[in-house]
Amino acid sequence: MKSIRVALSYAGKVQGWLRALVYGLLLSVALPMWAQQPVQHAFLWSSATGMQDLGSLGGSSYANAVNNSGQVVGYFFTPLNEVHAFLWTSNGGMQDIGTLGGNFSTASGINDLEQVVGSSSNAAGQVHAFLWTSAGGMQDLGTLGGSSSSGVAINDKGVIVGSCLTTGDTTDHACMRTHGRWHDLGTLGGTASYANAVSVYNVVVGNSLIATGDEHAFLWINNGMQDLGTLGGGTSNALGVNNYGNVVGFSALVGGSPSHAFLWSNAFGTMQDLGAFQDFSANSDALGISRFGKIAGYACTDFTNSVCHAAAWTGSNHQIRDLGTLGGTDSTATAINDVGQIVGYSDTN
């Protein structure tokens, strides 16, 4: 699983973690490398039950988001090795929610109204953001003017964020969809930006190129994009935000390596290094934060970064906890809800 994490969850996040999924590897869909990996399954973790295997409708499955009712969304590989979005519920299990007419879709966000957002290929092979509901099915949300868009997150007001190709397909910009249309959120001075999460107050976080060509985490609010800086290295990315404006993600340290999970808030005004497991020279990453400040992500066990486990940071001192695996070597936590339920994916063998 290490190669998948490096391709999608780490190197991908340097450029916007879902962009790597949507615009990169999975556009080809049937890649031999996937078949060579250990089987991975989406999981739902809680302190009461531990790590629950959510199964699959074919090959490996991956959970991306969870709402406060414990409904989970993500994607799985079909028996034909296509990638389809899923919705999982405790009563109905895993449901394929289809595509926009192509052979690829992935669900990336779900709110408490059971509105699901993600990205899908259409019959023409273009990737567009979608909104799915049980009543209306999958709706194509169009683009900002270019040929592609991605839906990454949705809040309880129905505001959607992601990344959109600009007119002429020259570059990607972080974008927000409100009142039935996409809005360009701009950049930190560079050519491209990517939105990864949005709070109920429409605070958006993500990453953007700056004038030097480095990528920095940003916070966008009231039509302005703020550079959140780094932990000393050249690169950072904001991946989660809660309704209090607390932001999590990862940043390179001085020298460029390792990269560590961070917590940023207005109270600090700077990034707080959340560290890793025992070996602080190993990588870690925070992907989600609950209303109550609990954080989910992953941390690697040593400097080789060959084994990484889903992790949670809790308490006032943000003590790190290893969440284990589904029986295999590696796991990653991708999101956490306000009830403390965590989702992600894990090797099963």
Image (spheres, grey):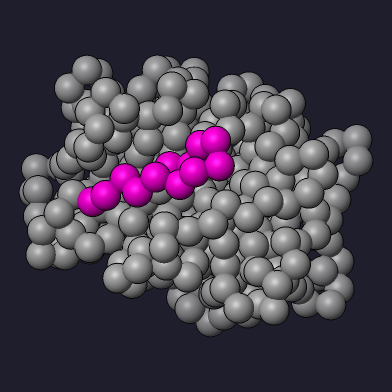
Position of residue 330 in the picture relative to residue 271 (left or right):
right
Is residue 159 visible to us here? yes
Q: Is residue 186 positioned above or below 298 on the image?
A: below
Q: Quadrant of the C terminus?
A: bottom left
Q: Residue at x 49, y 24 (%)?
A: 243
Could you tell me residue 315's position as x and y percent? 24, 18
Q: Residue at x 60, y 59 (%)?
A: 163
Query: How many numbered dots are placed on residues in this image?
Result: 0
Position of residue 121 in the picture relative to residue 325 (left or right):
right
Q: Residue at x 18, y 49 (%)?
A: 231
Is residue 107 visible to us here? no
Q: Nearer the viewer, residue 97 or 142?
A: 142
Which region is colored magenta?
219-230
228 inside magenta stretch: yes
Position of residue 264 in the picture relative to residue 65 (left or right):
left
Give the quarter of the image for residue 81.
bottom right
Position of residue 160 in the picture relative to residue 65 (left or right):
right
Q: Residue at x 66, y 69 (%)?
A: 166
106 inside magenta stretch: no
Q: Quadrant of the N terminus?
A: bottom left
Could you tell me residue 35's position as x and y percent? 52, 74
Could you tell me residue 157's position as x and y percent? 70, 28
Q: Is residue 71 positioned above or below 253 on the image?
A: above
Give the quarter of the image for residue 120.
bottom right
Q: Is residue 97 positioned above or below 135 on the image?
A: below
Could you tell me residue 11's position as x and y percent? 36, 67
